[in-house]
Amino acid sequence: MSRAVYASDPAHTRGRRHPEQPAPTRSEFQRDRDRIVHSTAFRRLVYKTQVFLNHEGDLFRTRLTHSLEVAQIGRSIARPLGLDEDLVEAIALAHDLGHTPFGHAGQDALNECMVGHGGFEHNLQSLRVVDALEERYPAHDGLNLTFEAREGILKHCSRRNALRLEQLEPGGVGRRFIDGTQPSLEAQLCNLADAIAYNAHDIDDGVRSGLISIEQLQELALFERHHRQALAQHPDLPRRARRLLYEVIRRMLSEQVYDVIDATRALIEQHRPHSADAVRRAPTLVRFSSGMHAQASELKQFLFAKLYRHPQVMQTTGQAQQMVRELFQAYLADSAAMPADFAARQDRERAVADYIAGMTDRFAAREHERLTGARLL
């Protein structure tokens, strides 16, 4: 499908922070995606957790598999809407590069440690990774991605940090959080694809773990509708519970994808943005319909209450947070325990935060045991 007038155009990108010659065979957004895939931070995602920590099982999702699922869902929606699929994929693959080990538990603990030193936001950390922390080029730090990719990676940002970014880069990726404008449609799409992906795979991982049941899920309108339809079409599925769950999740994903496409088309028709820049002055255009939004919110609330706050998950969450806090204090007390390039930095707290945020679950656990002598997980 041809690119729509409101899509981001790699031939008219707002550019890179360090000018480069165009590639002979790839668009600017394809180059972004390729740089992300070859980055060190991307490889680390395979050992960074989602809900279940890395040691708890080989089949649970990781940040890497989640990012791949977001990219797949994003491209499925981008194509019929005429958006740039390569930019969608680049944003999707990079959106979690700044996540700490141990998922949101690690992020919360690191933010607590950084109170008084600028705090810690994983979206801002993802931007730091692609702007500064990757070391792959002789002339500059970071991956030197396009403005559009960087804008999409910075999904959320506090006003305080947006103002700081604006000082460093006037009119840059922090501006929209100050003036209330929108990012590109590709960035908006990745935000929603992220939510669709984690709701679906957290159902799968939650049932696989035994912490939530099919019977509990049947209380949710979105799940029960597709559960009922799957059984009507395949009456033998109750004897194959795993296949039944996969079929229900597949149908749920499809309905949400088609709903986003239809709702977004209707909003684009209503607001008629004539360019990618016009999108920025419009309301959020990539959305669920009101009915699907309510059902997806019900599912999200269920997962929060029944899975993310399950006593078993909370127990490992507490241990993971203790580990991050104790790592932070250990490196702060003895910076020589970190690699030399981190130990040499003047901003010690931020250096420690950057080092810990880049760790995988298993490396963090090994480092914690090495430095403290305690094995928590």
Image: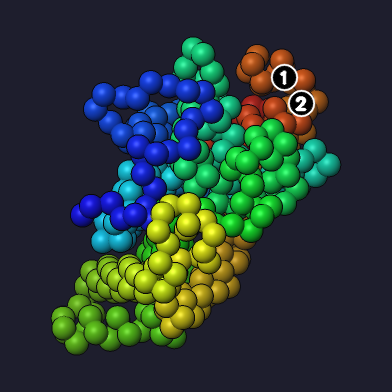
Give residue 203's position: percent from left, percent from top: 41, 67
> Where is residue 64 drawn, in percent x and y?
41, 44
Q: How far apart, in angstroms, are the residues tagged by discs 2 and 1? A: 6 Å
Q: Residues within 10 Å of mark 2 (few under 14, many from 20)?
A: some
Q: Quadrant of the C terminus?
A: top right
Q: Which quadrant, please, contains the N terminus?
A: bottom left
Residue 170 x/y as whole percent: 66, 37
For residue 330, say whether it is visible: no
Image mark count: 2
Question: Which residue is labeled 1 in the image?
Answer: 345
Disc 1 on helix, strand or loop? loop
The quarter of the displayed image where residue 351 is located: top right
Label 2 close to label 1 by CB (< 8 Å)? yes
Picture layout, residue 256 above or below residue 358: below
Toward the viewer: 210 or 62? 62
Left of 242 or right of it: where is 162? right
In the image, 248 versus 183, the foreground residue is 183
Q: Amino acid at mark 1?
A: Arg
* Secondary element at tag 2: helix
Name the disc covering residue 296, or none: none
Residue name at image x 24 percent, y 27 percent: 25
Q: Amino acid at mark 2?
A: Arg
Left or right, 128 with respect to 39, comes to right
**Is residue 168 visible to us here?**
yes
Which residue is rendered at x = 26% and y = 24% of the image? 24
Is 30 in front, or is 268? 268
Residue denoted by label 2? 348
Q: Is residue 320 above or below residue 195?
A: above
Q: Position of residue 35 (x, y in %)?
A: 39, 30
- Apparent side of residue 66 relative to residue 236 in the rendered image (left or right): right
